[in-house]
Image: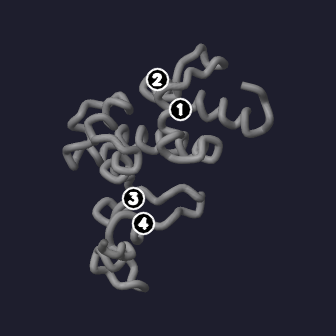
Amino acid sequence: MAAIKPAAARSGKSKGKPSAGRGGGAGTRATGRPDTTTPALPGLIDPQTVARDLGITKSDLAATLGLPADALLRAERVHAEKTQARLGELMEIIGRVETWCGTKRAAFAWYRGQGIAALGDETAEAMVKTNRAGVVRTYLNAIAAGSFA
């Protein structure tokens, strides 16, 4: 029977050296949310990172945001104010409910699938798609302050 090697030995990486791969250097913002920016897009949210973290494709991410698929595939569209605004709204909402849900993917499942009774049983996804992310923010602020759902 072969011995099981530690992950670092299997990958050929030495211990103590920072990984340049997934998550190696992205860090965490001062807000406690993962940094989803990339050096190629300084100050902008990278849709590839967001899609990877949520376990979906960029085309699925675009649909979730209510944007055409090429909005996240063409560089000039990724930099557009509307695209960045929707990505920011998504990440803000997911970041806020992640602590309640436990993981980013569980928070994303809530975002897409849980109707919010106080908002007419619409999901956070539906609200963001129709430019009503502010309503979701207000709802989350109320919940955080101790109001009932």
Q: CA distance from mark 1 to mark 3?
A: 23 Å
Q: What is the secondary structure assignment of the residue under circle 3?
A: strand
Q: Amino acid at mark 1?
A: Trp
**For marks 4 and 2 on the same chain, the one whose residue lies earlier in the sequence:** 4
Residue sitting at x 57%, y 32%: 134
Give the residue at mark 4.
26
Q: Position of residue 1 (x, y in %)?
A: 31, 72
Give the residue at mark 2.
126
Residue sitting at x 23%, y 34%: 69
Q: Is residue 14 above or below residue 104?
A: below
Q: What is the secondary structure assignment of the residue under circle 2?
A: helix
Image-based side of 116 in relation to 49, left or right? right
Front of the two marks 3 and 4:
4
**For marks 1 and 3 on the same chain, the one whose residue lies earlier in the sequence:** 3
Q: CA distance from mark 3 to mark 2?
A: 25 Å
Q: Amino acid at mark 4?
A: Ala
**For marks 3 and 2 on the same chain, the one whose residue lies earlier in the sequence:** 3
Q: CA distance from mark 4 to mark 1?
A: 25 Å
Image-quadrant location for residue 101? top right
